[in-house]
Image (tube, rainbow, N blue to C red):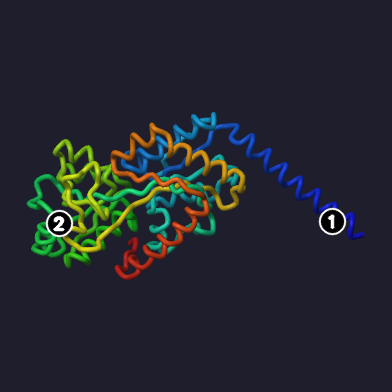
Amino acid sequence: MKRPAFLSLVLAVMAFFTMSSAISQVYPNRPVRMVIPFPPGGTLDALGRALAQKIGDQMGQPFVVENRPGGNGIIGGDAVAKAAPDGYTLLFNASTFVTAPMTMKEVPYGVEKDFLPISLVAKAPLSVAIAKDLPVTDIKSLIAYAKSRGDKTTFAVGSIGSAGHLATELLARAGGFSYTVVPYKGTAPAFQDLLGGRIDGFIDPILGSLQYHKAGQLRVIAVTSATRAPNLPDVATVAETISGYEFYSWYGLWGPAKLPDEIRTRLNGEVNKALASADIRDKFAPQGLVLTPGSSNDFASFQRDDMARAQKIITEANIRVE
C-alpha cells in the first residue's frame, strides 16, 4: 500500500515541475498589461514605459502600459489585485504603493497579502523644487521663509503618503516650520501648478524637475540624497544644512499574490536584464536614478523594511487621507 502511494507522490511532483517548466517556456504568448495607477507624465510613467518597452522587446510580446489613476493609486492597484495571477496583468508603481494605504481608513487589498514583489527597479533621490519667483535660494532661507508665514507656505503632494510627502514632512519637522499640503492626482499636474506659481514647493524625484530646472521654469534648491547628485553637482544636499537628512523614492514591479514562482522568476530575470542594458542605463542613470537589479526575495525584504520606516513617520505625523 505504501509503495503505490509513494510512487503517486513522485509522479505528482514530476508532473508539477514539468507543468511549471512548460508554463515558463510559453509565457508570454500574448500581450502583457502593465498598470501604472497614476496619470501619464512624471518619473513613474517615464520609467515604467521605458521598462515595458524593453521587457517586451526581450520577451517577444508587447508589454502595454495602462494608466489607471484615481483613489491615490488604489483604483489601479485594485485592478491588479483582482486580476488572474497568470502574469498578464502586472503593477508598476512607486514606493507610494506600500505607504499610501497606511494613511487610509479602508483599502480593498493588502499590500503583503494580495501582491507578490517581482523586482525592485530603481531608487531615486528627490529634489526640493520651488516656484521660480519665490524669495528663497537654499534650504536655510526656505526654512526662514516658511517660518515667517505660519502655515501659509504650500507644498504639493503627488499622492498622500508618497515618498515626496514623507520627505516634506521630515523636512518641516527638522526645520521647525509648518506648511499646507496641496494634494494632486499624480506629479504632472503638481508640476504644472508649480510652474505657474500657484504653489510654493514640491519635493519629488529629480527626474521630474530636472528639465524645468534647466529651462529656468522652477528652481531646485536641494536634493535629498546623502551626497550631491551627479546631474545637479552645483545643488546642495538637504543634509548640508540638516545633518543626517536622507530620503529616496523607489520603483518596483508586482504581480497578483498567487503568481506562479516560475513566471515571477522569469520576469525578475528579464527586469534585471533590462536594467543592465545600455539604453535603460544611459537614459535614466544620468537623470539621478539608481538602478537596482536583484532577486525577488531581495525586493520583498527591502519592501518590509521600507514599510516599517514609513509607518513610523506616518504614525508620528498623523498623516491621513481626509
Percent position of residue 286, x then y: 29, 38
Q: Is residue 126 left or right of residue 266?
A: left
Mark carried by residue 6: 1
User: Circle 2 is placed at which residue position?
Assistant: 139
Viewer-nearest residue: 240 or 92: 240
Say whether residue 43 is left or right of residue 227. Answer: right
Label 2, secondary structure: give it.
Answer: helix
Q: Residue 105 placed where, x, y %?
A: 41, 64
Q: Is residue 26 left or right of residue 211?
A: right
Question: Which amino acid lies under the numbered mark 1 shown in the image of this protein?
Answer: Phe
Whole-angstrom CA distance, mark 2 to mark 1, is 70 Å
Asked whether 215 or 10 is in front, the reply is: 10
User: In percent of the image, x 50 and y 43: which residue is there?
Assistant: 90
Query: Residue 140 or 195: which is nearer the viewer?
Result: 140
Q: Whole-percent x and y of residue 149?
A: 10, 62
Q: Earlier in the sequence, mark 2 or mark 1?
A: 1
